[in-house]
Amino acid sequence: MASEITKLPEPPCFVVCFSSQRTAGDDGYGAMAESMVALAKQQPGFLGMESVRGADGFGITNSYWTDEASILAWKAVVSHQAAQRLGRERWYEDYRVIVAKVERAYDIKRED
Amino acid sequence: MASEITKLPEPPCFVVCFSSQRTAGDDGYGAMAESMVALAKQQPGFLGMESVRGADGFGITNSYWTDEASILAWKAVVSHQAAQRLGRERWYEDYRVIVAKVERAYDIKRED
């Protein structure tokens, strides 16, 4: 998935940061990842997503949301979807999710 | 820089998400990036940093901090350092920084 920087509204909004270390091999991961992105885009409150994974299998996905209720709704959909598939433990050596409230944003045009 | 998932304290803490699209060529970028990481690690309130850049030049760096004052202090150091060098506009086609307050965290061990 090619990423570009999400255009955000004025704060506050919310960011979900997903950091992960992939296991070796695809094992259905690619299809699942595409499905997760498609699901997010359909969710109310979704503002955008940025995702990068390095050659060593470490990846970061930051997704942006208008409010916490939208994140919880997305989490419920994702959990349901994941339960129907292989389970995240198969694809990841390690991962961590945080939910955070965006308080300030700077971009290249406004940065001093 | 090899990344691993930062061990976070109980919320709240703060995350700085830096998304960027690199320009072509190194042009001093590698040395600057290493210096920025070293500076962050020396700062009070620094909890950890995760960073990935893809082959297409798009990158995400999430750094974690105990409080906002620590972030502002780091920003002042980084700005000073950057001003002494080439300026960020040279290295990036586009970038965006957000500061966000971490409200919840889940990891692979605690996730349902």
Image (tube, coloured by chain):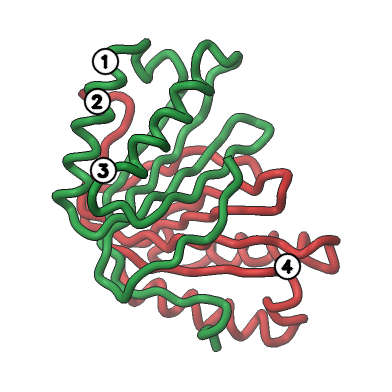
Chain colours: A green, B red
Q: Which mark is residue B32?
A: 4
Residue ID for mark 1: A83
Query: What amino acid type should be assigned to the residue bearing mark 1?
Result: Ala
- x, y percentage for residue B91? 73, 70
**In the displayed structure, does residue A34 sit left or right of residue A87?**
right
Who comes first in sequence, dot 4 or dot 3?
A: 4
Q: Are the residues at dot 1 and dot 3 in contact (C-beta closer than 8 Å)? A: no
Give the distance between the C-alpha atoms of the residues marked 2 and 4, in whole angstroms: 40 Å
Give the distance between the C-alpha atoms of the residues marked 4 and 3, in whole angstroms: 31 Å
Relative to A31, is A8 above or below? below
Relative to B90, is A79 above or below? above
Quadrant showing the C terminus of chain A: bottom right
Q: Is mark 3 on a helix, strand or loop?
A: strand
Q: Which mark is residue A79?
A: 2
Could one spot residue B9 in this view of the protein? yes
Nearest the eye: A79 or B36: A79
Q: Which mark is residue B105?
A: 3
**In the displayed structure, does residue A66 sit left or right of residue A62?**
left
Relative to B81, is A3 above or below? above
Q: Which mark is residue B112?
A: none
**As drawn, which residue projects farthest toward the left?**
A69
Query: What amino acid type should be assigned to the residue bearing mark 4?
Result: Met
**As drawn, which residue projects farthest toward the front?**
A42
- x, y percentage for residue A56? 65, 31
Q: Mark 4 lies on which chain?
A: B
Q: Are marks 1 and 2 on the same chain?
A: yes
- x, y percentage for residue A78? 28, 29
Q: Are the residues at dot 4 and dot 3 in contact (C-beta closer than 8 Å)? A: no
Query: What amino acid type should be assigned to the residue bearing mark 2?
Result: Ser
Nearest the eye: B83 or B17: B17
